[in-house]
Amino acid sequence: MDLTMNLLLAIATFVVAVMGDITHVLDEINVERKTELKKLPESLQEDAKLSTSEMIKKYGYPCEDHTVVSKDGYVLKMHRIPYGRSGPSNNRSAVYVQHGFLCSSVDWIISGPGKALGYYLADAGYDVWLGNVRGNTYSRKHTKWDPKKDAKQFWDFSWHEIGMDDIPTMVDYVRKQTGQDKIFYIGHSQGTTVSYVMLSQKTEYNSKFRAVISLAPIAYMGRVTSPFLKTFSLFEHYTEWIVNMLNIYEFLPRTGNVAAAGGWLCKHSMFQKLCAESLFTLCGYNREQMNITLVPVIMSHTPAGASIKQFLHFVQEINSEKFRQWDYGIVYNRVKYKRWSPPDYELENVKAPVYLYYTHNDWLAHVEDVEKLASELGNLKGKFLCSDKNFNHIDYMYGIDAPTLVYNDILETMKKH
Ligand SMILES: *[C@@H]1O[C@H](CO)[C@@H](O)[C@H](O)[C@H]1NC(C)=O
Ligand SMILES: *[C@@H]1O[C@H](CO)[C@@H](O)[C@H](O)[C@H]1NC(C)=O
């Protein structure tokens, strides 16, 4: 199964590579993860192996693990940094931070104290909760199903289910644990998508947030420029058909080392790079903001796991240019939704105060798509176009200048609430 998926990805990526500039870019990154890792200082080599909570403790911050179970049985793990260098106090506002597609809680701490958003918020006096949604490294568990043996059941979800179940479950847990009626929400990429799903569908959640901060917001995707995603979207029905035929449920299975497990295609060096660096293939690579030293460490933790259905739902968004529920095709839509096409997520129902952070060089959250989202949200409080024209989708997590370009601004915004 892994082999087939990698084959599929390799073919698609090959097309992209031939059409675009990807190979060149990836060559520049020059990551054969393992060899690169060995060249790093020992401490960073160790970081490649540590879990989120182990790493947080290693860098001298307190960390707690918290486990919750979604209504439909997914076992979700959150990491909490209750306070930072400023020390403990009992009036710290809670902030829930939600990662994006293929990512995990680790991405909020991986660039280290003084740089990563997780530490940044803790040092600024917040009680930081890092969520992990179903299917990723930390939430790859279900009360009934095994992700491998019961793959068909386990992976049968999209980001709709994440927004309807995982996020409300984790948010309510944080509110209960901290005794705070309203908390902050910071989402990145898919982490914003799921917040809009929740807030538009379960409108009682709007009053549970002091502010919702969206980094690289993803609702409308009609103008996505990622060559990888565009290639797949051209073959939406074909991709769906192949995936169904071959019973592929998990997106880019993380079998320790994708390249090694991926079989013969990935063994050829060009393909090895392409197979392995899915995040860069999807989102692009910004030489000025990416800390090259960190790349092998990042690649040891990412991709962290997601379902094929999540990916295909995004592909549907690209083609439909709508922000709406899963499209079953007209026959089953009729059965499921009692209408021919899936219902839209009503963005005017999002009444929590929302702040949007976006940028010119984002392959996924295009400026015009974000503007469209902005015009429809029920209570938009502000939108900030990044002053660095080259800042891209993943720089919100790892960008060298993310603290000065984005995080400081987030803190200012949070102070207003
Ligand atoms: C928490 O309390 C400290 C000292 O009592 C105060 O300086 C700080 O502004 C308070 N923080 C919040 C978020 O209320
Ligand atoms: C890159 O990452 C390493 C390891 O965390 C760090 O020591 C270094 O200061 C970083 N470089 C920049 C420019 O942030």
Image (spheres, helix red, strand yellow):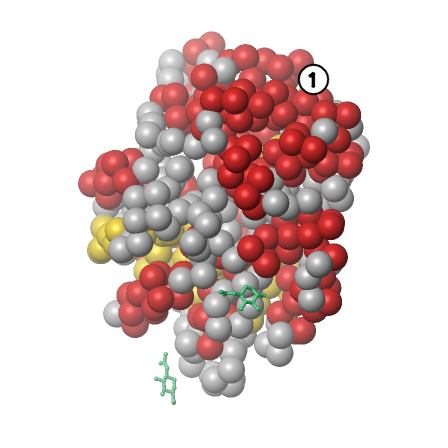
Q: Can you say which quadrant of the picture contains the C terminus?
A: bottom left
Question: Is the residue marked by circle 1 packed among few (<14), some (14-19), or many (20+) residues within 10 Å?
Answer: few
**SS type, badge 1:** loop
Return the residue at label 1.
Answer: 246
Q: Residue at image x 43%, y 78%?
A: 125
Residue 244 location, x and y as percent?
A: 63, 17
Residue 272 visible in rendering = yes
Q: Residue furthest top?
A: 331
Q: How many marks?
A: 1
Residue 146 location, x and y as percent?
A: 76, 38
Q: Can you say which quadrant of the picture contains the N terminus?
A: top right
Q: Residue at image x 24%, y 43%?
A: 374
Q: Is mark 1 within 8 Å of ligand 2?
A: no
Q: Residue at image x 44%, y 47%?
A: 286
Residue 269 location, x and y as percent?
A: 70, 33
Which three-letter amino acid code belongs to the residue tagged 1? Leu
Q: Nearer the viewer, residue 186 or 364?
A: 364
Q: Residue at image x 72%, y 29%?
A: 268
Q: Is residue 248 above or below residue 33?
A: above
Q: Is residue 154 above or below residue 170?
A: above
Residue 11 location, x and y as percent?
A: 61, 20
Q: Quadrant of residue 211?
A: bottom left
Q: Nearer the viewer, residue 264 or 96?
A: 264
